[in-house]
Image (tube, helix red, strand yellow):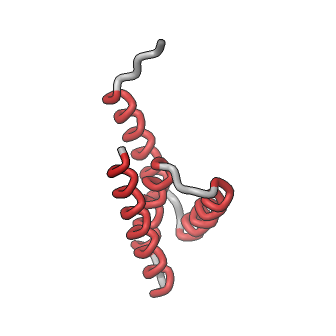
Amino acid sequence: MNVVSLSVVRAIKQAKNLDYTQKIHSMSKVELLEEMVRFQQKRTTQGAYDQHMMLEGKILFQALEKVAETEELRTLSKRYQKHLTLELEQLSRKL
């Protein structure tokens, strides 16, 4: 039987999120748009968001909102962030 410390699991998740945040902040606008397409394709393939994907999506769409040159992209980014926040809240209520 394997015993896993929840604090260790949380620390690993936070480290992964930090790595992803650093990756996102080092991307150009074009790379961010490519990452958005990859994110949406992954979502389509998986059929549903998992917690890790929701957190990455929030990071991605916050960055996209900051660099958006059009109101449409800014609005899309805000809507995705709101949607992912609601999904995370629903998931946390289940746990």
Which residue is rendered at x = 64% and y = 53% of the image? 46
Q: Is residue 43 left or right of residue 55?
A: right
Q: Is residue 90 left or right of residue 49?
A: left
Which residue is rendered at x = 43% and y = 52% of the image? 21
Q: Is residue 29 left or right of residue 74?
A: right
| Residue farthest to the bottom, as pictured | 71
Q: Position of residue 38 (x, y in %)?
A: 63, 60
Which residue is rendered at x = 33% and y = 51% of the image? 93
Q: Position of residue 62 (x, y in %)?
A: 40, 66
Q: Position of residue 26 (x, y in %)?
A: 48, 56
Q: Measured along the vertical axis of the image, is residue 64 above or below residue 59?
A: below
Q: Measured along the vertical axis of the image, is residue 84 above or below residue 67?
A: above
| Residue farthest to the front, as pictured | 94
Q: Position of residue 28 (x, y in %)?
A: 53, 65
Q: 43 or 59: which is nearer to us?
A: 43
Which residue is rendered at x = 46% and y = 49% of the image? 51
Query: Can you tell which quarter of the image residue 82 is in?
Result: bottom left
Q: 71 or 7: which is nearer to us?
A: 7
For the C terminus, the quadrant is top left
Q: Measured along the vertical axis of the image, is residue 49 above or below residue 32?
A: above
Q: 61 or 67: which is nearer to us?
A: 61
